[in-house]
Amino acid sequence: MDGPARPRLTSPSDFQFGAVSTETIEDALLHLAQQNEQAVQEAAGRMGSFRETRIVEFVFLLAEQWCLEKSVSYQAVEILERFMVQQAEKICRQATEQLGSNGKTGSPNWRVLKEQLFNKFLLRLVSCVQLASKLSFHYKIISNITVLNFLQALGYPYTKEELLESELDVLKSLDFQINLPTPLAYVEMLLEVLGYNGCLVPAAQLHPTCLTLLDLVYLLHEPIYDSLLRASIENSTPSQLQGEKFISVKEDFMLLAVGIIAASAFIQTPQCWSQVVAHLQSITGIALESISEFSYAILTHSVGASTPGRQQQPAPPQLPARVLKAVAVSNT
């Protein structure tokens, strides 16, 4: 694809912590907490349906081939997820209207829309990756030529005009709101706060492991959240209603972030795990039990070793007064 891939412009080890003022960090953390609260409250329907393993893996591999940052991968998945859910709901609405009126409506047949969505899925996926790269323009933007060469190599002879129309379709469908929050933003923000609050494990040490585990959660989204659901209801066969109510947990990026960091801390320095979890609880307001259960689910699907959720936990140490503290929504 346009010659040999260029090396990444940055790497996890280049990520700098402690370079921003406490006031800025506090404002940013509160803003993320508010965004998360809104997302959890609005979570419903088919949200999360398109974070399927094969789709996520394809996006990750494509972003790696095009030398894009990890943040672009997550952003592309979230844009594609929102777009596909919006399109699926649109098709369902039209199907309901047409079935109720015996097809006597002015709207296109819902089966035609479904077929079009299916046939153009790869094009839409690539458009989402390209749009995500444009949000991170200070790294690298994927050109139309690169995208067209990739599609043509797979046997899809799209034109530049069709590619531009696809980008515009995604933008219009999402009302041009594509700068969506991702779990990575929450992870890196909480790591920043942990550094300011005197956490024993350096944020820079946790960061690479957090990225690896976040990749894992995206790739194993369903099995990890299914095990978390079964653990939360203490039943191996959750009902449909319980599954629907659990959608809000799947959209809780603050909860995911604390689970990722806690699991990373357990892998890096198990002896400091309880202190890290206590810090996370103090910062976010999420219950210690919820953090433990989430980190247990992540670790069970990654290393499969003896993990914190099933060990007898020592009492968390008394923590000094916090420089920063924000309360986020928890689903406990």
Image: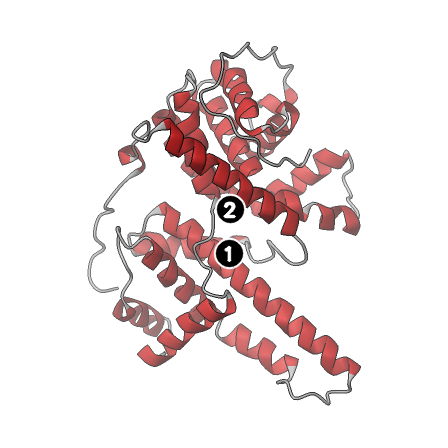
Q: Position of residue 152 (x, y in %)?
A: 33, 74
Q: Residue at x 43, y 27 (%)?
A: 193
Is residue 253 visible to the viewer in this orientation of the structure? no
Q: Position of residue 331 (x, y in %)?
A: 67, 37
Give me the disc on residue 41: none
| Amino acid type for the residue under numbered disc 1 | Arg
Mark in the foreground, 1 or 2: 2
Q: Quadrant of residue 256?
A: top right
Q: Are marks 1 and 2 in contact (CB under 8 Å)?
A: no
Q: State the SS at label 1.
A: helix
Is residue 326 visible to the viewer in this orientation of the structure? yes
Q: Residue at x 46, y 68 (%)?
A: 170
Q: Nearer the viewer, residue 83 or 302?
A: 83
Q: Nearer the viewer, residue 130 or 52?
A: 130
Q: Nearer the viewer, residue 144 or 327?
A: 327
Q: Residues within 10 Å of mark 2 (few under 14, many from 20)?
A: some
- For residue 92, side relative to residue 57 (left or right): right
Real-space Cα distance between discs 1 and 2? 10 Å
- For residue 306, side relative to residue 26 (left or right): right
| Amino acid type for the residue under numbered disc 2 | Tyr
Residue ID for mark 2: 218
Q: Residue at x 60, y 41 (%)?
A: 224
Mark positioned earlier in the residue sequence (1 or 2): 1
Residue ID for mark 1: 54
Q: Position of residue 263 (x, y in %)?
A: 51, 28
